[in-house]
Image (cartoon, grey):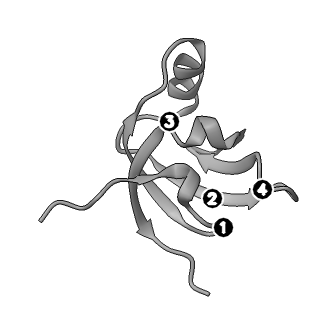
Amino acid sequence: MEKTLTLLSECSFGDCFLIKEINIKGPLRRRLLDLGFVKGAEISVLRKSPLGDPVAYRVSNTTIALRNDESSMILGEIVRGNTK
């Protein structure tokens, strides 16, 4: 049974996310690939801004803030969820 893909923007603080697809084009795609946002990479959700956008993520020892419209184009699965 195949898992349903989740949007990175739907992840919560503390989640660990495994990238399966990146549906971003142009210079932003190149920048994200250079920073380690590649298929199979693990991303940790670090913190959200007070208004919820942007959100800070950690990938390959790099911290980057992405807006929700950007992170909603990155799909994958949550491999370790937040333990509340």
| Disc number lying in front (1 or 3) | 1
What number is the disc on residue 34?
Answer: none
The residue that mark 3 highlights is: 37
Residue 63 seen in this snapshot:
no
Residue 83 seen by the camera:
yes
SS at mark 2 in the image: strand
- Label 3 to label 2: alpha-carbon separation: 13 Å
Name the amino acid type tagged 3.
Phe
Alpha carbons under labels 3 and 4: distance apart: 21 Å
Q: Which residue position is annotated with label 2?
A: 45
* Pointer 4 residue: 52
How many marks overall?
A: 4
Which residue corresponds to the image point at 76% horizontal and 45% vertical from the top-left? 54
Q: What element does badge 1 sit on?
A: loop
* Three-letter amino acid code at the position of disc 4: Gly
The structure residue drawn at horizontal position 41% and vertical position 45%, both measured from the top left corner, is 75
Quarter location, residue 71 = top right
| Mark 2 or mark 4: whose residue is earlier in sequence | 2
- What residue is at 28 percent from the left and 59 percent from the top? 4
Quadrant of residue 72 within the rendered picture:
top right
Contact flag, marks 1 and 3 (Cβ < 8 Å): no
Mark 3 vs mark 4: in front: 4
- Alpha-carbon neighbours of circle 4 within 10 Å: few (<14), some, or many (≥20)? few
> Which SS class for mark 4?
loop
Query: Going from the N terminus, do you reach mark 1 or mark 3 first?
Result: 1
